Amino acid sequence: MLKSANLLGIAGVFFLLSLNACRPYHVRQQKYIQLIQKEQFALAEDQLESSRKAKKKEKHKLLYVLDRGYAAFQQGKWSESSEWLMKADRLAEDYRKQLGYDALSLLVNANVKPYKAEDFEVVMMHYFNTIAFLKQRNFESALVECRRMNNSLSDMYFKSSSKPKYKDDAFGHLLMGLTYEGSGDINNAFIAYRNAYEIYNSDYASFFETPVPNQLKEDIIRTASALGFRNEADFYRKVFKLDSIQLNRLKPFAEAVIFWQNGLGPVKEQWSIDFIITQNAGSISFNNAGLGLNFVFPATSISQQDANNLASLQVFRIAFPKYISRSPIYKTASASSNGEIRSFQMAEPLEQIAFKSLSDRFSREMGLAILRLAIKKATEYAIRKENKEVGALMGIANAITEQADTRYWATLPSSISYLRIPLQEGKNKVILRANRLNNAIARTDTITIEAQKGRIYYEVYNTIKP
C-alpha cells in the first residue's frame, strides 16, 4: 500500500511537470520569431545563441538546431547552415528510434519527449540543405540531399501504421531534376521531372489542390527532346497541350532558378475537445456530436481496471494540436531581367501539407490521448482510495497536464514557388516584385548575378515582412 508521503511526492512531480507544459512553444520563442518576421536574421541568430534554455533542453534540442540552420541559411552562411541542418537530420533520426520517453509521455503528455519533427519538416531539412549545397555548386552533396529528401518521406510512410496521404514529395523530385540539370546530367533530370509530374498530377492535385507547374511541363518536353526521346516529347506535348514548345529552340546563355519562400507557415496551437463516453458490449465509444466525431474502441484495447475507471466518467476533455493559418502578405510574385518577365509558380504548398499531415494522424493521436487519459484516471482512482486529499490534487494535476504538443518548426515558409529566367553574359540584374491580393506591387527587390555560359544559378527570394 502506498503511503501518504509517497503519494504527495508523486502528485508534486506531476504538478511541477504540468507547470512547464502550459505555454505553447511558439510563445516561448516569441522574441526569435518576431525578429524573423522582420527579416532581421542576424539578430534572430544572436537571440538563439543567447537562449541558454533552448540550447540545454534535450526535448527542444532539435528545434534549436533547426532554427540555427535556418538563421544561418537566411544570411547566406551556406557551409554553417549545412552543418546545423545535418546535425538536425541526425537528431531527428535518433529521436525516431528512441522509445524510452514513451511511458512518461503516456503518464504526463507528449511535451516531455524530445521533439521528433513532422514528416514534412524532415523533408524541409533536406530542401534547405540542398539549396545550401547548390549555392556552393556542390552538386554531388546536393543530389545526396535530394535523394534523402525523397527517401526519408518514403521510409516514414512505410513505418507508419496510419499510412498518411503525404507519402511522396513532388517538389523533392522537381528539385532533384533541377540539380541534375545544373550538373549537366540531362537524362536523370528528365527522369526526375517525369517523377515530379506524376506526383503533382495525382497526390498534389487531389490532396493539396496544387496543379502541375507549367515550367515543369516545359522542362519535361525540353529534356526529352534534348535526349532524342521524340516519342516521349510528342506524348507530353499532347498531354500538356503545349504544341507551341519548340523542340530545337536555342538554349539561353545561362539561367537562374529562383525559389520564392513566401510568408510563414501555420502556427500550431492547442484545442480541447469534450467527449461523451458510452459503453456497449465489448466496445467503448467517445462521441462529440457537434464536431461529428465518434471513435469506437474495443474494450480489450485497455485493461479491465481502466475500463472500470472510465465507466465512472460521462464526459471528459482531451487536448490536441491544431494549425492556425498565418496568411502571407503577398499572393503573387514575378521576376524580370533583360526584357524577360516570368511569374512564380507554386511548387510546395507547405501550409496545406501541414494541415493534411496533422489531419491524417488525428485518429492515431486520439487513440494515444485516450490511452493516456485512462492511465491517468487509473492512477488517480488508486490514489483516491488511499488519500482523498492527494487524490484531489492528482485530479488537478491531471487536468493541467492534459496538454497537446504544440511544438513545431516555426519559421518554415507558408509555400515555396519557383521560376526559371534566362541570363545574358556578364552582370544581370533580376528585379523581383511581390504583389498583394489586389495584384498591386507592394515590394521590389533586386538580385545581381554574374553569369557564365551554360550555368544554372540558384537563388532564394524571401518575403515575410511588408
Image (cartoon, grey):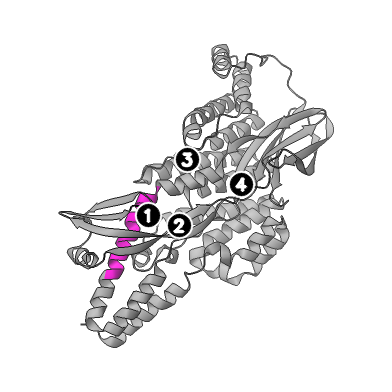
Q: Is residue 106 visible?
A: yes
Q: Is residue 347 left or right of residue 453?
A: left
Where residue 7 appears, as percent x and y from the top left, is: 30, 82
Residue assigned mark 3: 151
Using the numbered discs, state the Cα–Cα distance from disc 4 to disc 3 in whole angstroms.
16 Å
Quarter of the figure with residue 42: bottom right
Using the numbered discs, state the Cα–Cα distance from disc 1 to disc 3 in whole angstroms.
25 Å
Q: Earlier in the sequence, mark 4 or mark 3?
A: 4
Judged from the image, the secondary structure of the residue bearing numbered disc 4 is: helix
Using the numbered discs, state the Cα–Cα distance from disc 2 to disc 1 in whole angstroms.
9 Å
Residue drawn at x 48%, y 65% as measured from the top left = 59
Q: Which residues are magenta?
A: 361-377
Q: What secondary structure is the stretch in magenta mostly built from?
A: helix
Residue assigned mark 1: 365
Is the residue 411 above or below the residue 454 in the image?
below
Q: Which mark is residue 128?
A: 4
